[in-house]
Image (cartoon, rainbow, N blue to C red):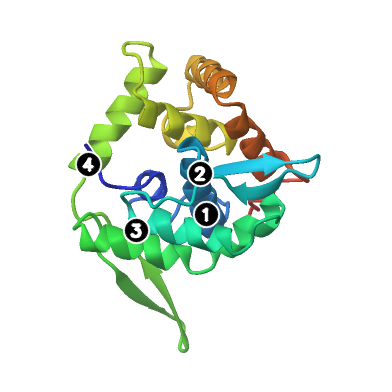
């Protein structure tokens, strides 16, 4: 069983061959959303009223320090709308997620000098078996060859809601399968559907912006 968060799996999926994040959305916003999405799936968060203000339903610590830190931050901002809560969680989240992947030996951190005064950080993969393994599970679920486990279902629903399914597959039938799996998850866990709607469809391009 993996001890990575959904945000870490998402990071591995989104890294391209140069160690940069391929989509144009904010990585910080996507990782913050994934952490909150995972906490909501664990029944730790709930939304109230027509503005969908966020509250901590259960502050009991999880088995993961990154999720616990996120839960504590949200506890200090109870009553915030999803947009503001995402902004709070997004502060420093890129470094926290990538530091864990470096420590796990899945990526390495490289500083690349650009021009004279500026540098950028990239995270090339140091091993690919881990990403290949859960990418294979995603493909199997999309091809309907296996029934997805809960974690795979969560990741597919998040990718579908964020319009990022193309990092796994660009086939139309797979998109339809992802939509079906997502709707099935929303039926069992309506709060997740509401959260996804607020995070990705709240206004214009969504709370989690393009960059």
| Sequence order check, earlier mark of 3 and 2 | 2
Q: Which mark is residue 32?
A: 1
Foreground disc of the pair 2, 4:
2
139 or 154, nearer to the observer: 154
Label for residue 44?
2
Q: Label 3: how many residues lie within 10 Å, few (<14), some (14-19) or many (20+)?
A: few
Comparing marks 3 and 2, which lies closer to the viewer? 2
Inspect this view and state whether residue 183 appears: yes
- Farthest residue toward the right? 50
Element class at badge 2: loop
- Point out the tag, 2 or 4, that comes first from the N-terminus: 2
| Residue at image point 22% right, 63% down | 103
Query: In this view of the protein, which residue sits in the foreground, 50 or 96?
Result: 50
> Quick one: SS at disc 1?
helix
Identify the residue at horizontal 52%, vertical 48% (top origin).
Answer: 36
Q: Position of residue 19 (x, y in %)?
A: 35, 58
Would residue 34 appear left or right of 162 to someone viewing this image? left
Label 4: how many Cα within 10 Å (few below 14, some 14–19, many 20+): few
The extreme top residue here reads: 145
Residue at 35% across / 44% down in the picture? 9
Q: CA distance from mark 3 to mark 2?
A: 15 Å
Query: Where's residue 86, x and y in %?
Result: 61, 56
Query: Residues at badges 3 and 2 in contact (C-beta under 8 Å)?
Result: no
């Amino acid at each position: 069983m993996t001890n990575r968060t959904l945000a870490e799996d998402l990071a591995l999926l989104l890294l391209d061959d140069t160690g940069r994040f391929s989509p144009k959305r904010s990585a910080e916003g996507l990782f913050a959303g994934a952490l909150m999405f995972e906490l909501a799936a664990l029944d730790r968060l709930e939304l109230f009223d027509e503005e969908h203000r966020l509250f901590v339903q259960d502050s009991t610590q999880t088995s993961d320090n990154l999720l616990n830190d996120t839960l504590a931050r949200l506890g200090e901002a109870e009553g915030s709308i999803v947009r503001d809560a995402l902004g709070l969680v997004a502060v420093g989240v890129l470094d926290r997620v990538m530091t864990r992947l470096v420590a796990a030996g899945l990526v390495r951190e490289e500083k690349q000098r650009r021009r004279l005064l500026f540098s950028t950080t990239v995270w090339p993969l140091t091993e690919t078996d881990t990403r290949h393994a859960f990418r294979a599970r995603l493909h199997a679920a999309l091809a309907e060859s296996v029934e997805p486990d809960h974690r795979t279902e969560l990741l597919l629903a998040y990718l579908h809601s964020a319009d990022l399914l193309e990092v796994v597959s660009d086939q139309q039938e797979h998109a339809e399968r992802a939509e079906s799996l997502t709707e099935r998850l929303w039926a069992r866990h309506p709060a997740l559907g509401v959260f996804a709607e607020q995070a990705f469809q709240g206004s214009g391009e969504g709370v989690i912006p393009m960059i």
